[in-house]
Amino acid sequence: MHNVNNETELHVITPNEPGILGRVLGTLANGGVNLRALSVYSEKNEGHFRLLTSNNKKAETSLRALGYKVKTNGVITVEISDRIGAGAEIGALLGNAVIDVDYLYGSSAGKDHALLVFKTNNNKKAYDTLK
C-alpha cells in the first residue's frame, strides 16, 4: 500500500515579525538539521511553524535557546506518488473510515513522490486505515 509512519512534528511559536522565517530556518541549518516538511502561518502576534525535521531533539534545543516555545505533536506521514488524484485517494480512505483531519501539509521534491503530514482526531485509526 502506502509508506505510512507515526512521527513527531515540532510546533514552534515565535513572535510574528519580519525576518523570523530566516531566523528559524537559519538556526536549523546552522545546527545541521534538515527539514523534511514545513508549514508556516501567522496568527495575531505569533508565528507558527510546524516542522518535520531530521533531528527533533537538536532542533528543539536550538530553537528553545532563542526563547521560542516548542511543542510536539504526533502526526501521520504518508508517502504517495506525485500524480493527479493521489491525495484525493488518501482523503477518500480517511473519509470512508470517518476520520476527521485536523490539518494537513505536504512536501514534494518532484521525484515522483510527495510526503503528506497530517494530524487527525484518531491518528491510530488513520495509520491503520492507510497502512
Image: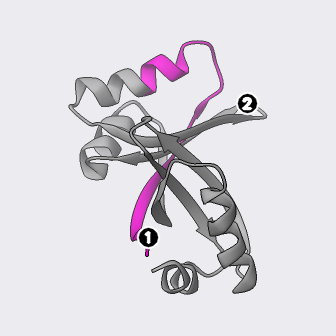
Q: Position of residue 114 (x, y in %)?
A: 48, 48
Range of magenta residues: 1-24
Whether residue 114 sits left or right of residue 87 in the image: it is left
Check the image and name the residue furthest to the right: 44
Residue at the far left in the pictured view: 32
* Residue drawn at point x = 47 percent, y = 63 percent: 78
In the rendered image, is residue 18 in sight?
A: yes
Q: Which residue is mark 2?
A: 45
Residue 38's label in the rendered image is: none
Do the residues bearing badges 1 and 2 touch, measured as CB atoms within 8 Å?
A: no
Q: Residues within 10 Å of mark 2 (few under 14, many from 20)?
A: few
- Residue under label 1, please give it: 2
Task: Give me the C-alpha separation between circle 1 and circle 2.
Answer: 39 Å
Which quarter of the rendering shows the N terminus? bottom left
Percent across and percent down for residue 116 are 53, 55
What residue sits 61% from the left and 13% below the top? 18
Q: Is residue 74 visible?
A: no
Residue at left offset 36%, top offset 21%: 26
Locate residue 129, reporting x and y percent: 55, 84
Check the image and report above or below for 76 versus 27.
below
* Residue 5 shown in magenta: yes
Q: Label 1 amino acid? A: His
Residue positioned most to the front? 84
Q: Disc 2 marks which amino acid?
A: Asn
Q: Is residue 17 left or right of residue 81?
A: right
* Residue nearest the observer in this picture, 37 or 50: 37
Of the numbered discs 1 and 2, the one sitting upstream in the chain is 1
For label 1, the crowd category at 10 Å Cα-Cα, with few meaning under 14, some 14 to 19 and many 20 or more, is few
Q: Quadrant where the C terminus lies? A: bottom left
Who is closer to the viewer here, 3 or 57? 3
